[in-house]
Image (cartoon, rainbow, N blue to C red):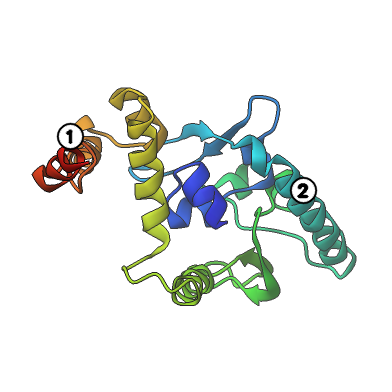
Amino acid sequence: MTSLLYGSGLRLMECLHLRVQDVDFGYKQIIVRDGKGLKDRSTILPTQLIDSLKKQIDKVKILHERDLAAGYGSVFLPCALERKWKNAAFEFKWQYLFPADRISIDPRSGIQRRHHLSKDYLQASVKKAVIKADVNKRGTCHTFRHSFATHLLESGYDIRTVQELLGHKDVSTTMIYTHVLNTGGKSVKSPFDNLAKQAI
C-alpha cells in the first residue's frame, strides 16, 4: 500500500478504496474513482509493483471465494450502484484490493460484509516503520504522495502532467511542490562549498 502511495501518488483513502478492477495491468495505470471532489482520474502503475499486485489480487480472489462459500461475499458499492446492479456487490471485480481481515456489519445497511482495511492500520504501520528506520523527521502516509510529486518534478516532468496524476483541481496546488525544488540546497550552492573547492 505504501508503495502505491509513493509510486502512484495516491491519497491514503484513494488507496484503501481501490477495487480489483481499478488496477489496469495492460495500460499500467491505476484508476482512482471518486477521488477528492468526487472525480475519477488515472495515474501510473509502477512496473515494479505489477508482480506483487497480481499476487495481492490472487489472495483477494481466494478470500472472496471463501466469503461466498460462507454466505457472505458482498461489498459496498458507491453511488447507489447496488440498486442498479443487484448482483454486482458479489462480483469479484468490485472487491476491495486491500480487504479487511474480518467480516463486519456495514453501519449504512446493516449487512455483514468485508470492508477495506482501516486507515488506522496503514497509518500505524507507517509510523512504526518511520521509528524503526530511525528517521528524525515527521513521516506520514501523505509524505509518500508529496515525495511522488517532488521527485517527478525533479526528474523534469511538466507541472500539468503532475497536476493530472495527483488529481489537483487547480495547478496552483501543484505549484507548492516547485518551492521544494528551489530550497534545501538543491539549486543554490553554499558559498562555503565554493571556497572549499578553490582551496583544493
- Which residue is found at the position 33% from the left and 33% from the top? 154
Left or right? Give the position of 170 relative to 58: left
Residue 17 visible at all: no
Residue 160 visible at all: yes
Left or right? Give the position of 174 relative to 79: left
Q: Which residue is mark 1?
A: 172
Vertical order, 183 against 116 (above or below):
above
Q: Which mark is residue 131?
A: none
- Residue 20 percent location from the top left of the image: 69, 46
Which element is circle 2 on? helix
Q: The N terminus lies in which quarter of the figure?
A: bottom right
- Which residue is found at the position 48% from the left and 73% from the top? 120
Q: Which residue is mark 2?
A: 92
Which element is circle 1 on? helix
Residue type at numbered disc 1: Ser
- Residue 49 percent location from the top left of the image: 66, 44
| Residue 105 figure quarter | bottom right
Q: Residue furthest right?
A: 69
| Residue 172 figure quarter | top left
Tell me the CA gap for discs 2 and 1.
39 Å
Q: The C terminus lies in which quarter of the figure?
A: top left
67 or 194: nearer the viewer: 194
- Residue 125 percent location from the top left of the image: 53, 72
